[in-house]
Image (cartoon, grey):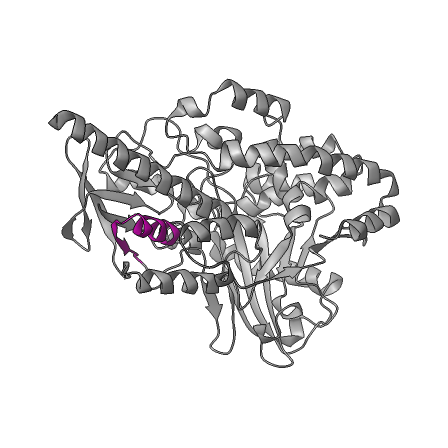
Amino acid sequence: MKIAIIGAGIGGLTTALLLERQGHAVTIYEQHEQPGGRMQYETDGVFQIDQGPTIVLLPDMIRNVLRACEIPAEALDIVQCDPLYDIHFADGTSYTKYSDPARQREELSHKFPSELPHYDQFISDMEEVYRIGVKQFLEQDFSNKRRFFTPANLHFLYKSKAYRDVHAYIGKYFTDPKLQHAYALQSLYIGGSPYATPAIYGLISYSEHIHGIWYVKGGYAGFVNTLVSYCKERGIEIHCNSKVDRIHKSAKQVTGINVNGSFEAYDSVVFNGDFPAIHDLLDQKKPARKQPEASSGCLLIYIRANRKWDNLNTHQFVLPEQFEKNMRAVFESQTVPEDPSFYVFHPGSIDAAAAPAGESALYFLVPVPSGNKIDWEQQKDLLAERVLDKAERLLLPGLKESIEWLKVRTPADAQHAGLYQGGSFGIAPSLFQSGGFRPQNKPFPIKGLYAVGASVHPGGGVPIVMQGAKNLSELIMSEVDYYAQKTIRESM
């Protein structure tokens, strides 16, 4: 088939490589100057740092998808972070997570000795949940809803208590509020509140211990360059500055697209933008039902500093005195948190080339509301100052006076770039926006129309989006086989 892909994010690029291996002629259209979607660099001309994702999870899942693309595993050039990260609490204490089971048990024995058996039970229980969850949910497409509502799936969801929220589920294991927060905050990786995201996403904190956290040499955005180079090598055309403003269809079948005002005929179209925007391209009126809930937004601060902090690990989390109040402000009242939680990325601890000699590259991510309720031009500097003051006091002495370059990115900037309501992770991973309830690879009964990306099942995060692309390629292969057999039968 002749296939157009709208969007050169990680989902679009991976889908293109998979479909090209199936023998299809694939062309990608990207409205921005560069491919990569959320995976870009920020730079001041002297150094560069990831604009979006920084934490590499589930490397074996990524390698498995690369294998399906016939790309060698070495193309993902990663090194392991161990310790995984430090979590800093408001009372001045901290907790460090490790990949090494012995070191983790030593850390627990030292700081939370009564929780050690609870941790062991958590790891033991989650092993089965992970094994079944990946096979029955992440590696499955639910375009046919009957594949989701099977007795086996429903039994698993009930048994694993997936209907509970992550924080409540973690509370079943850990009694100390600090560890409850430490093992529930990972829902923020995909833009979901720990108090609303389904318990099955507790798999994220489990997977960190079992599969590790990794760093892509040169930054995660460099992985995009790898995929782009394979696309070009294999004859996949990537057209940047090419805005698709309409998907054409006739009698429930895709016929092509409008690109920069001109019609291009295609047999199939894959949409790799933030999913709710597909309705505009189909000239559909917005659905009458409630619009999807967006994931959280992020206030992002990028810094080049003229000094080094040799004792600072690659990843740090700083939690507020009242974690639940902070989360309620972000996800419910949609107000700027008075005492923000934040994440710090310090690539120089693992990559000497991350910044010029004697300097540091730093990245701060602050969970904030998505949507339009906050005037970020008025609020961003105040919130950034609050975060940097706290970071200087707790982690980075001398930070503010060492800043050579600083840039702040807000949900308003993300929305301008095309992210749904300024949410950094697509639509929220809430109960009724997960699994079979989430937009699927075949979202509508329109032949030749497909979708992939963070807002599409199985969800957000680089490895999960790549797995979604693999699910889509398998769906397209099955449909091609089905229609080929149908044509043969009709011709007999």
Is 247 placed left or right of 332 in the picture? Answer: left
Would you say 61 lies left or right of 207 here?
A: left
Residue 91 visible (yes or no): no
Q: Is residue 50 visible?
A: yes
Q: Which residue: 47% across, 38% down? A: 458
At which x and y percent is residue 39? 45, 58
Q: Relative to 423, say whether 174 is above or below.
A: above
**Magenta segment, which residues?**
12-31
Say if the magenta span includes residue 72.
no
Q: Quadrant of the C terminus?
A: top left
Residue closer to the observer: 239 or 482: 482
Residue 19: give x, y in percent of width and height.
Answer: 32, 48
Q: Quadrant of residue 323?
A: top right
The x and y percentages for residue 30 are 30, 56
Q: Nearer the viewer, residue 185 or 144?
A: 144
Residue 155: quadrant of the picture: top right
**In which quadrant will I find the N terminus?**
top left
